[in-house]
Image (cartoon, rainbow, N blue to C red):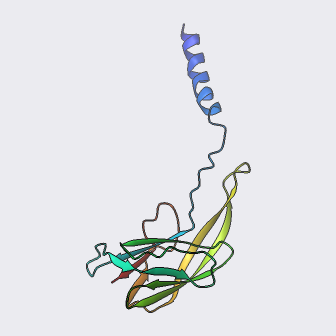
């Protein structure tokens, strides 16, 4: 009886590890730059955007004319910089960023995903805007904070 119990104890871990021999190809990265608008004390602040444009891009963004506190903008993995223009009724502001992209292989059977990193603000005409998280990932809640 004791030998059977020991055999089961030795075989049981092997069964659990053999069931999980396939790689998990769940993406860990994203290409979405997350911009948050906040008030002077850091709470989310809604602004009205009439449009959002990205220089040198064929991507079309919808005309917002809506109240928003957060915007997510896709980054191009074939580029290393982006200029975003935020248009309101009477004001237009811009932000220029540079970033790096690195291909990442999670496992040979998974697709390659791009890691966006080292986000740096090159210039802006917002009075108070800063990079709060230079790594662009699914876990990041905001990369840029704009006090408005």
Residue at the right extreme, as displayed:
108
Q: Horizontal and vertical percent for residue 112?
A: 69, 59
The residue depicted at 59 percent of the width and 50 percent of the height is 26
Q: How many marks?
A: 0
Q: Give the image quarter of residue 76.
A: bottom right
45 or 53: nearer the eye?
A: 53
Q: Give the image quarter of residue 127.
A: bottom left
Query: On the rendered structure, is 105 left or right of 64?
Result: right
57 or 2: nearer the eye?
A: 57
Q: Horizontal and vertical percent for residue 56?
A: 63, 84
The residue depicted at 69 percent of the width and 74 percent of the height is 78
Residue at the left extreme, as displayed:
41
Q: Give the image quarter of residue 14.
A: top right
Q: Horizontal and vertical percent for residue 22?
A: 66, 40
114 or 70: nearer the eye?
A: 70
- Of the 4 image quadrants, the one containing the N terminus is top right
- Of the 4 image quadrants, the one containing the C terminus is bottom left
The residue depicted at 42 percent of the width and 80 percent of the height is 50
In the rendered view, tell whether residue 135 sits above or below residue 147: above
1 or 145: nearer the eye?
A: 145
Q: Horizontal and vertical percent for residue 138?
A: 50, 61
The residue depicted at 57 percent of the width and 18 percent of the height is 8
In the rendered view, tell whether residue 44 sits above or below residue 55: above
């Amino acid at each position: 009886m004791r030998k059977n119990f020991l055999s089961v104890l030795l075989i049981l871990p092997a069964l659990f590890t053999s069931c999980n021999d396939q790689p998990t190809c769940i993406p860990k990265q994203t290409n979405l730059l997350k911009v948050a608008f906040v008030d002077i004390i850091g709470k989310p602040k809604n602004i009205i955007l009439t449009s959002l444009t990205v220089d040198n891009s064929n991507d079309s963004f919808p005309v917002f004319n809506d109240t928003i506190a957060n915007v997510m903008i896709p980054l191009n993995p074939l580029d290393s910089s982006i200029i975003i223009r935020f248009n309101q009724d009477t004001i237009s502001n811009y932000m220029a960023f540079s970033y790096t992209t690195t291909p990442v292989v999670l496992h040979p059977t998974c697709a390659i995903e791009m890691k966006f990193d080292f986000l740096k603000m090159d210039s802006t005409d917002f009075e108070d805007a800063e990079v709060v998280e230079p790594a662009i990932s699914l876990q990041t809640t905001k990369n840029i904070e704009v006090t408005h």
